[in-house]
Image (cartoon, rainbow, N blue to C red):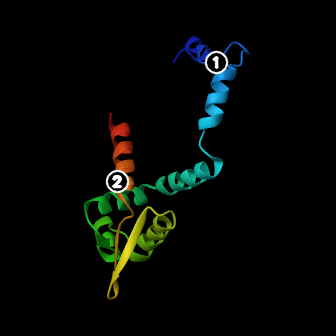
Amino acid sequence: MSNKKNENAVCSTTIIHEDILEKVKQEITDDEILFDMAAEFKVLSDPTRLKIINVLMLSEMCVCDISALLNMSSPAISHHLKSLRQTRLIKYRRDGKIAYYSLDDEHIKAMFSQCLTHVTE
């Protein structure tokens, strides 16, 4: 990329557009919500956790199944599942001694799919 192109990306004036600022101030997302979003993105920044989300999009699974599928130890998978549960990206249900994991809601699948589409276009 040439230096001339980079120079054009910087504003060369100090004019403040008050109308735009007022509109944006009224519509900007609350800091607390942005903090929660950042926490979710941080959890999703790990490729193993993304793999777990991906497999749970396809089927509800227990730790042993996820461990076998991803060729990882059950404690390692459990650690990742805990992080995903804490941010409410996944949930679990008990059936006797087995805990089955699934996506918390359809928004998670949509978020994954949107990111996949963006990355692969």
Residue corresponding to mark 1? 10
Residue furthest to the right: 14
Given this view, does label 2 or label 1 mark the residue nearer the observer?
Answer: 2
Counting from the top left corner in percent of width and height, residue 51 is at 36, 58
Amino acid type at image mark 1: Val
Label 2 secondary element: helix
The residue under the point 71% across, 13% down is: 13
Residue furthest to the left: 58
Quick one: label 2 or label 1, which is nearer the N terminus?
1
The residue under the point 55% across, 14% down is: 5
Label 1 secondary element: loop
**Few, some or many residues within 10 Å of mark 2 (<14, 14–19, 20+):** some
Establish if 32 lies above or below 121.
below
Counting from the top left corner in percent of width and height, residue 101 is at 35, 71
Is 24 or 74 nearer to us in this picture?
A: 24
Residue 120: name its quadrant: top left
The residue under the point 47% across, 68% down is: 85
Residue corresponding to mark 2? 109
Residue furthest to the bottom: 96
Establish if 33 lies above or below 9.
below
Is 76 or 98 nearer to us in this picture?
A: 98
Is 35 or 3 nearer to us in this picture?
A: 35
The residue under the point 69% across, 22% down is: 18
Amino acid type at image mark 2: Lys
Counting from the top left corner in percent of width and height, residue 52 is at 36, 62
Where's the C terminus, which quadrant? top left
Counting from the top left corner in percent of width and height, residue 109 is at 34, 53
